[in-house]
Amino acid sequence: MSSGGHSHDHDHSHDHDHAHGHDAHEPLVVEDEAGNTEGQIFVAALQALLVERNLIAPGEVRREIERIESPGVHLGAKIVARAWVDDGFRTRLLADGKSAVAELGIGVGEAQLIVVENDAATHNLVCCTLCSCYPRSILGQPPAWYISKAYRARAVREPRAVLKEFGLELAGGVQLVVHDSNADMRYLVLPQRPAGTDDLDEAALAGLVTRDCMIGVAVLSEVPGAQPPTA
Amino acid sequence: MKPRFDAGDRVRVLDLGKPGHVRTPFYVRHHVGTVLHRAGAFLNPEDLSVGRVCGPVVPLYRVGFAMRELWPDYAGDPADMLAIELYDHWLAADGPAPDTIGEAP
């Protein structure tokens, strides 16, 4: 990493605390006065050049970011809810995730979608040890912890300890399967349908499904509304 | 390239010692697992990352490993396992542990 251009002015507002033990002379993050990182500075310069030469129009980059960021957890939730109410769909989903979700009008940009099903005897957990592979087409952008080095390293080394920190303690006899999405596949956990949801329709079921249960760091608990009110 | 392995085959992960954009993490190298299923065939990411965007596709497999195979001190359930995607050229039929670094095809 080049340190050229970075000022070591010690009155700089972003200056780091030199008393906290890092003795590396190079700053961990290079920033300009506005707080942009080195990568952002390069990208902004490139974008300005492309616009100046009429290769892209202003707004095109913004629209592309909007397109990339528009998929969200609601798509994954829709897939899970359909699988809960339609056994035929569930079977097709587990056999070929990409084709099955296309039935719902959801396009998966990644090579293939592998859907892994939780049941009474099996719990699935997804991670990407090498980078940040994630089923972005159907869950949107990954949470910060998913791309942290700690999660990436520990999810395959001590997954039960990780789950415990997320508040999930698996029952004895439950097999934990950790999926490292290290190459071309992407993974979606099909959570177990929670108890007390027999009366809910597909849309209401989709409303229960959370991002974290589709990654596998959480499970869906019994629906609070279905519990008898406390007297 | 025809897939050399199929579901149920025991395979050992090679250590090809390649630099760059390899998709075989160190923690599975030298370990023995079982092919779960074939997962299609893709351009080799090691070549794609350096701009070689054509050429033969390489079979990909999902391979399962017992956590205790990967981590002898693994404290969880003995049945716990890891599933990971591995390209054909990183795998050998299970046999004696290779004592030399393999070569890329």
Image (spheres, coloured by chain):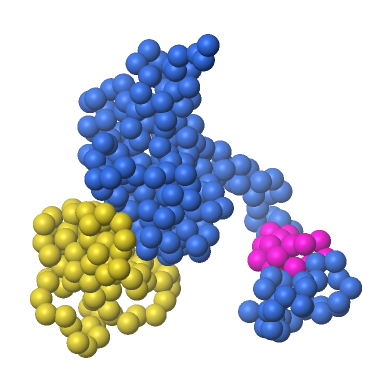
Chain colours: A blue, B yellow
Q: Residue at x 43, y 64 (%)?
A: A153
Q: Position of residue A47 (x, y in %)?
A: 69, 59
**A31 to B84, vertically: above or below:** below
Residue farthest bottom in this picture: B100
Q: Is residue A41 above or below residue A145?
A: below
- Count the numbered circles shown: 0
**In this view of the protein, can residue B12 be seen by the observer?**
yes
Q: Name the residue nearer the viewer: A132 or A168.
A: A168
Our reading of the magenta stretch's main secondary structure is helix
Q: Is residue B25 left or right of residue A77?
A: left
The percent coordinates of residue A118 (x first, y second) are 30, 39
Q: Residue at x 47, y 58 (%)?
A: A151
Q: Which residues are magenta?
A: A31-49
Rendered image quadrant of residue A90: top left
Give the residue drawn at x 27%, y 70%: B72
Q: Quadrant of the N terminus of chain A?
A: bottom right
Looking at the image, can residue A109 be seen? no
| Residue projecting furthest to the front | A231
Q: Answer with left or right where residue A231 lies relative to residue B56.
A: right
Between B38 and A153, the one lying in front of the other is: A153
- A207 left or right of B88 in image: right
- Where does residue A111 sit, x and y in percent of width and height? 34, 50
The front one of B100 and A196 is A196
Left or right, A46 with respect to A173, comes to right
Q: Residue at x 48, y 47 (%)?
A: A166
Q: Is residue A119 above or below residue B70?
A: above
Residue A129: give x, y in percent of width and height. Answer: 41, 62
Q: Is residue A36 magenta?
A: yes
Q: Which quadrant of the view contains residue A96?
A: top left
Indicate the quadrant where residue A75 lies. top left
